Amino acid sequence: MFNHLLSVEVSDYEINQRQSVKIEQTLKYFQQTYSVKYFIIGADNLSKLHLWYNFKELNQLVLFVVVSRDGIKLNNDIISYINIALDINISSTAIRDNLDTKFVPQKIQKKVHI
């Protein structure tokens, strides 16, 4: 189904900035470095996407891809987006609650509330 996974790269760009980074800055970096055209968000972010910092510019930089989750309705007439209907019941909270953290340093665990 996801044949493109071989071309996925995990970036430490934001970590290396050693400060809070706005998504706009990250997207501009990725566009210059990798020619990024899409930004994937969860369905729970769609209804408040227009409230994100510098939303209008973000909306011009990329096409949003919304991954739907079980039980979250996709209601938005502000932007165009592509929908990936994953429709599974999962959340970052559930992942965090079930994560084996023995290899995560204490400092990081406290920072991300693991």
Image: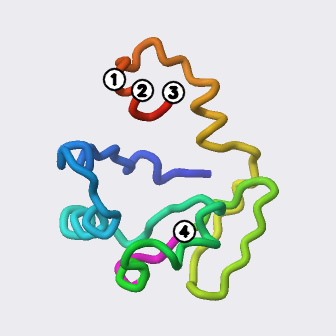
Taking the spot 46% from the left edge, 12% from the top edge, the residue there is 102
Highlighted range, magenta: 60-64
How far apart, in angstroms, are the residues tagged by discs 3 and 4?
Answer: 28 Å
Which residue is the site of mark 1? 107
- Specify the amino acid type for callout 4: Val
The disc, 2 or 4, on the residue closer to the chain's N-terminal end is: 4
- Specify the amino acid type for callout 2: Lys
Which residue is the site of mark 2? 110
Near mark 3 (Cα within 10 A), the count class, few <14, some 14-19 or many ≥20, is some
Residue 35 falls in image quadrant: bottom left
How far apart, in angstroms, are the residues tagged by discs 3 and 1?
Answer: 10 Å
The disc, 4 or 1, on the residue closer to the chain's N-terminal end is: 4
Q: Identify the element where label 4 is drawn.
A: strand
Please state the total of marks drawn on the protein image: 4
Q: Nearer the viewer, residue 83 or 72?
A: 72
Callouts 1 and 2 close, C-beta under 8 Å = yes
Which residue is the site of mark 3? 114
Which dot marks residue 65?
4
The disc, 3 or 4, on the residue closer to the chain's N-terminal end is: 4
Q: What scheme was used to colour the molecule?
A: rainbow
